[in-house]
Image (spheres, rainbow, N blue to C red):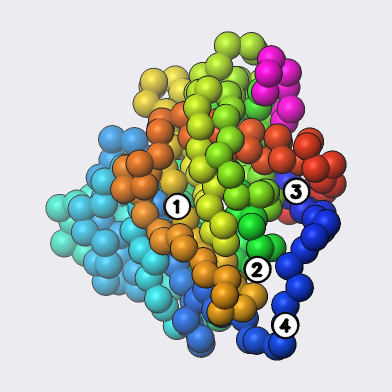
Amino acid sequence: MRKSAIAGVAAGALIAVGAAAPALAVEDGMTELSVLHGIPDTPVDVYVNGTNTIDDFQPGDLAGPLDLEPGTYTVALTATDAADDSEPVLGPIDITLEEGMSYTAVAHLTAEGDPGVNLFTNDISETAAGEGRLTVRHTAAAPAVDVWADGAVLFENLSNPDEVSGDVPAATYEAAVSLTGETDPVLGPTDVEIADGVNTIVYAWGSAEAGNLDLAVQTVDTHASSPSEVAAGTQGLAADRGVPAGAIAAILLAFALAAAAAGRMVTARR
């Protein structure tokens, strides 16, 4: 089940003077698609509607965002030396993209280690002034995880292919994460900065059994409520953003720490 933390309204909220139309995070009349390759040891070409759109796509790479017209697209992954998409290694699958939305298609391993594709919708709704959004997606062939702070479990049992998300004050947070029910951290502790007006999305990918667990980080601008609120993020890879290898833990715990400190309400959503 996907879970979401709904941020409460903080005292001293900024009062807007006058009316202004929200700035769009996606080009008007279009839809936005990014693609993450999360299957280890398997470089591929990505075909969209029969056209080689992403050539020699390497594991861990994040491509996009692609600005597309709304509609249904057929996606297939092939070997990098394939002449066409007639013999895909994964797919073809049809994905439907709606106007004004942001999506990430992730080729990844299931919890059992089988290859698959999942289409995630990126939350680009407006964040409050001074807050950023956290999204964590478990797309690895690995057990569920627990999140720790100061020796105590604050968030339990995040499983593939679930996600957690929530709005938290823009700040730097420290965290650690363990496999569910265990005490030794498998990632962290480390620090990570959450930026104002940006949805920071962290993906755990790879295989625990094969020993190649890794992460990728994507940042997506949210809608701005007024011209004075500038969303500063861009999409890119973890390496491009300088995010440390333990950032999956920090992102998870950032959510938990902020929720605990502010008394935020946690609700479940699909």
Q: Is residue 154 magenta?
A: yes
Left or right: 56 as drawn, with respect to 234 = left
* Mark 1 in CB contact with mark 3 (< 8 angstroms): no
Assess disc 4: are there few (<14), some (14-19) or many (≥20) residues with their C-alpha within 10 Å of its C-alpha.
Answer: few
**Could you say which quadrant of the image residue 85 lies in?**
bottom left
Q: Residue at x 67, y 23 (%)?
A: 149
Q: Of marks 1 and 4, which one's residue comes earlier in the chain?
A: 4
Q: Of marks 2 and 3, which one's residue comes earlier in the chain?
A: 3
The kind of residue on which mark 1 rests is: Gln
Can you identify the residue that label 2 sits on?
126
Please provide percent x and percent y for residue 32.
46, 71
Can you identify the residue that label 4 sits on?
17
Q: Of marks 2 and 4, which one's residue comes earlier in the chain?
A: 4
The segment highlighted magenta reads 149-156
Please provide percent x and percent y for residue 141.
50, 31
Q: On screen, 6 above or below 13?
A: above
Which mark identifies residue 218? 1
Nearest to the observer: residue 193 or residue 223: 193
Left or right: 131 as drawn, with respect to 264 = left
Nearest to the observer: residue 119 or residue 183: 183
**CA distance for labels 2 and 3:** 15 Å
Can you identify the residue that label 3 sits on?
5
Q: Secondary structure at mark 4?
A: loop
